[in-house]
């Protein structure tokens, strides 16, 4: 195959969405690739405030990457999750946490310091009404021209697809949760 006539972009917008597993895992793989290329990376996590494997991994590698890797864990857990939420958190608390996390992501995406900003589970925050589609659009449009942006979570707004360069829909073929098995540490979180 000839690549004559192809060119590169200074930065791209990437979306990992869909009903199935693998969105956060794909964004972590992207983070690894970017760090391996000596990029500055900000990993901003919406929703997951409880202990998950990626938090331990990022915490453990942060000393190796010093100022090259920034991690922010925001959010108050799943919104409207019923029995999945171990404690009562008000709608206002969820919205406030989502807004604070968005502010962190917006600053990282617009400051020009980071080559890659990953907003893990931001699509969920928008779909749940904790943030607006307009805020997500602003994040995409206002990012630094040299900053690539990755957004994960279910239900990425279709109206924003023209603004992205790469969009992957994770679709489930089979998952043991459907057979009433809970998530497994190390596999699902």
Image (spheres, helix red, strand yellow):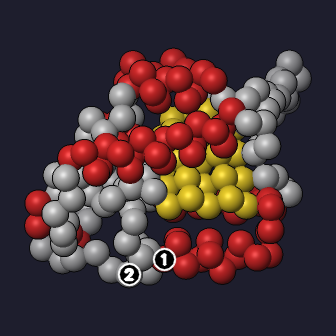
Q: Is residue 62 visible?
A: yes
Give the quarter of the figure containing the C terminus: bottom left
Give the CA separation, mark 1 to mark 2.
7 Å
Q: Decide which of tag 1 and tag 2 comes sooner along the chain.
A: 1
How many C-alpha atoms fall within 10 Å of the one at disc 1: few (<14), some, or many (≥20)? some
Q: x and y percent of residue 152 in the render?
A: 46, 46
Please tell me which residue is depicted at 39% across the width and 55% down the height of the picture: 75
**1 and 2 marks in contact (CB < 8 Å):** yes
Secondary structure, mark 2, is loop
On the image, which quarter does residue 182 sit in?
bottom left
Give the quarter of the figure containing the N terminus: top right
Position of 70 compared to 157: left or right? right
Q: Name the residue under label 2.
A: 185
On the image, which quarter does residue 108 sit in?
top right
Please tell me which residue is depicted at 31% across the width and 60% down the height of the picture: 77
Q: Nearer the viewer, residue 158 or 139?
A: 139
Position of 158 compared to 181: left or right? right
Q: Which of 117 and 8 is in front in this view?
A: 117
When the figure is inspected, residue 91 is found, relative to residue 164, above or below; the finding is below
Residue 53, label in figure: 1
Q: x and y percent of residue 146 in the render?
A: 79, 32
Please tell me which residue is depicted at 38% across the width and 81% down the height of the picture: 185
Please tell me which residue is depicted at 11% across the width and 67% down the height of the picture: 83
When the figure is inspected, residue 113 is found, relative to residue 175, above or below; the finding is above
Secondary structure, mark 1, is helix
């Amino acid at each position: 195959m000839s690549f004559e006539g192809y060119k590169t972009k200074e930065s791209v917008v990437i979306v990992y969405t869909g009903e199935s597993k693998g969105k956060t895992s794909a964004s972590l793989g992207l983070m690894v690739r970017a760090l391996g290329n000596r990029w500055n990376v900000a990993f901003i996590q919406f929703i997951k405030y409880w202990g998950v494997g990626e938090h331990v991994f990022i915490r453990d590698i942060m000393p190796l990457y010093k100022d090259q890797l920034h991690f922010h864990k925001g959010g108050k857990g799943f919104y409207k999750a019923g029995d999945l939420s171990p404690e009562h958190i008000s709608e206002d608390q969820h919205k406030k946490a989502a807004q604070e996390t968005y502010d962190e992501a917006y600053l990282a995406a617009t400051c020009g310091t980071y080559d890659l900003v990953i907003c893990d589970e931001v699509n969920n925050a928008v779909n749940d009404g904790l943030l607006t589609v307009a805020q997500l659009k602003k994040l995409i449009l206002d990012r630094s021209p040299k900053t690539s942006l990755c957004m994960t979570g279910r239900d990425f707004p279709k109206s924003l697809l023209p603004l992205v360069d790469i969009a992957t829909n994770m679709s489930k073929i089979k998952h043991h949760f459907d057979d009433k098995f809970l998530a497994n540490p190390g596999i699902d979180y």
